[in-house]
Image: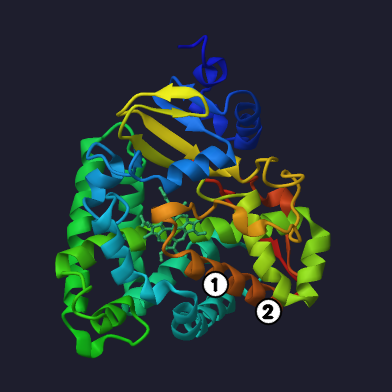
């Protein structure tokens, strides 16, 4: 096998994180379907192949009960395929549609952003990840679930346990047990919220669910299972996109200057940042029948990692793909939020959070800029972001 797949066989996952794009480029050009010996899975790196796989849920399924996401959260829209998954999405998508995000959540997001900025506005500089980017998405989730602000610490604790469990590649029993106990706490907390509808804020997901017609409404257990993945999906991802977008602007000062005076351009900045520095670099699928991908035979039961970060830099689709260009015509073809039946449910919310965050930071912190000397370069081969980012402004 190592002769047939020489590049993948030599890949050391631990070293990929420092600059995954160099590895993606080599794989994409020379070995677009590659057997990565160390991980026991195929990497698929071209846009066309990645998109085709993500759209074909019958041949490339999400679920298998030996996957960490299933082990941690069980059955929900992200671990099943077919009509059941479609039913769950249909029942839950309403609150995440653009109009709903705009009308129900945007003003709350702006208020949260402003409160966070108030805490450090006088300082002149801040490490933004800890003070802002990792807190905002948790606070937004409080709104999504109609929970009080005091629950932020609780949600953070649960999230950290879930995140550890989803990266628990050694299946450490203590990490699994802690996550399962937090799943129990999360569900009990949400169940109590769900069953006190009189107190549910109108903007919350649960209030919207109760408005859903009875024939598509999910039962309580289904709602709680899906609430877990909605919560999990919306935290580190948004944190990463806030930081990656600022980092991209720091490297492209002319775009930063343009956005300071033309806030409309922020929509394209966020989109191009999602393409150029994709927070979620990979989506995994299990092959359900013997199949060929780009001429490579793959056996039923194999695992495939669709490298979204690589697809988003594929020169076959994006002209001058390594350049950060907010004016590119086919920006919307990026796969940062995946595609097909499991396309990100929260992409409109994520876009709104990042756009509002950047707009308010620029409005309220005069002449703010990233201090690149004190900022870590985005890294990570499955999940990409700077580990810290320092922002400076005029006080
Ligand atoms: C920049 C931020 C985000 C990025 C880059 C992102 C990326 C993704 C990607 C790539 C997938 C597909 C995974 C796969 O096919 O294996 C996905 C699915 C999902 N995301 Fe997001 N996401 C973001 C924000 C959010 C937010 C804010 C929420 C919740 C409100 C959310 C909820 C979900 C859910 C529930 C799914 C599963 C959908 C399904 O299986 O049908 N995401 N996301």
Q: Is 147 positioned to the left or the right of 246 in the image?
A: left
Name the one closer to the observer, 157 or 223: 223
Can residue 76 be seen?
yes
Name the front one of labels 1 and 2: 1
Expressed as whole percent of the image width and height from the top left, the position of residue 14 reads: 50, 28
Q: Is residue 94 above or below residue 68?
A: below
Residue 158: image location, x then y, percent: 30, 58
Mark 1 or mark 2, earlier in chain: 1
Task: Choose top left, top right, bottom left or bottom right for residue 87.
Answer: bottom left
Q: Residue at x 29, y 56 (%)?
A: 77
- Asked if residue 106 lies left or right of residue 94, the reply is right
**Where 56 falls versus 260 (above or below)?**
above
Mark 1 to mark 2 CA distance (whole Å): 18 Å
Q: What colouring method underlies this structural image?
A: rainbow
Q: Which of 241 and 293 lies nearest the eye of the viewer?
A: 293
Identified at 60% across, 35% down, the residue is 20
Q: In the image as oriented, which residue stretches furthest toward the bottom?
A: 198
User: Which residue is labeled 1 in the image?
Assistant: 352
In front of the other: 36 or 288: 288
Q: Residue at x 28, y 57 (%)?
A: 85
Q: Secondary structure at mark 2?
A: helix
Whether residue 244 is visible here, answered yes or no, is no
Q: Is residue 239 left or right of residue 206?
A: right
Task: Classify mark 1: helix, strand or loop.
Answer: helix
Residue 180: image tag:
none
State yes or no: discs 1 and 2 in contact (Cβ < 8 Å). Answer: no
Left or right of 54, for residue 188: left
Q: Residue 364 bears which disc, if any? A: 2
Identified at 29% across, 50% down, the residue is 81
Which quadrant of the picture is home to ligand 1? Answer: bottom left
Q: Residue furthest top?
A: 3
Image spot of residue 109 (x, y percent): 50, 78
């Amino acid at each position: 096998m190592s002769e047939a797949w020489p590049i993948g066989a030599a890949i050391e996952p631990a070293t990929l994180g420092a600059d995954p794009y160099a590895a993606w480029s080599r794989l994409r050009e020379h070995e677009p379907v590659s057997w990565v010996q160390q991980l026991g899975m195929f990497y698929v790196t071209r846009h066309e192949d990645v998109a085709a796989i993500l759209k074909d849920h019958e041949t490339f399924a999400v679920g298998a009960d030996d996957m960490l996401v299933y082990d941690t959260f069980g059955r929900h829209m992200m671990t099943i395929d077919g009509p059941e998954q479609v039913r769950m999405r249909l029942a839950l998508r309403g609150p995440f549609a653009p109009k709903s995000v705009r009308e129900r959540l945007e003003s709350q997001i702006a208020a949260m952003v402003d409160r966070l900025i108030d805490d450090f506005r006088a300082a002149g500089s801040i490490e933004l990840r800890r003070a802002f980017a990792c807190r905002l998405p948790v606070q937004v989730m409080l709104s999504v679930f109609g929970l009080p602000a005091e629950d932020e610490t609780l949600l953070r604790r649960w999230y950290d346990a879930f995140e550890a469990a989803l990266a628990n590649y050694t299946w450490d029993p203590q990490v699994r047990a802690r996550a399962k106990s937090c799943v129990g706490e999360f569900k009990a907390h949400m169940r109590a919220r769900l069953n006190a509808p009189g107190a549910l804020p109108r903007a919350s997901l649960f209030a919207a669910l109760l408005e859903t017609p009875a024939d598509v409404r999910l039962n309580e257990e289904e709602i709680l299972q899906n609430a877990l993945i909605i919560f999990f999906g919306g935290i580190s991802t948004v944190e990463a996109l806030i930081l990656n977008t600022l980092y991209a602007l720091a490297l492209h000062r002319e775009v930063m200057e343009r956005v300071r005076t033309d806030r409309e351009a922020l929509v394209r900045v966020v989109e191009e940042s999602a393409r150029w520095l994709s927070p979620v670099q990979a989506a995994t699928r299990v092959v359900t029948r013997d199949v060929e991908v780009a001429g490579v035979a793959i056996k039923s039961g194999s695992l495939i990692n669709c490298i979204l970060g690589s697809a988003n830099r594929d020169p076959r689709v994006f002209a001058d793909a390594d350049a950060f260009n907010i004016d590119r015509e086919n920006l919307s073809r990026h796969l940062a939020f995946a595609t097909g039946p499991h396309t990100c449910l929260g992409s409109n919310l994520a876009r709104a959070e990042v756009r509002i965050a950047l707009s308010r930071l620029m409005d309220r912190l005069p002449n703010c800029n990233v201090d690149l000397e004190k900022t870590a370069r985005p890294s990570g081969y499955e999940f990409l972001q700077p580990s810290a980012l320092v922002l400076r402004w005029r006080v």
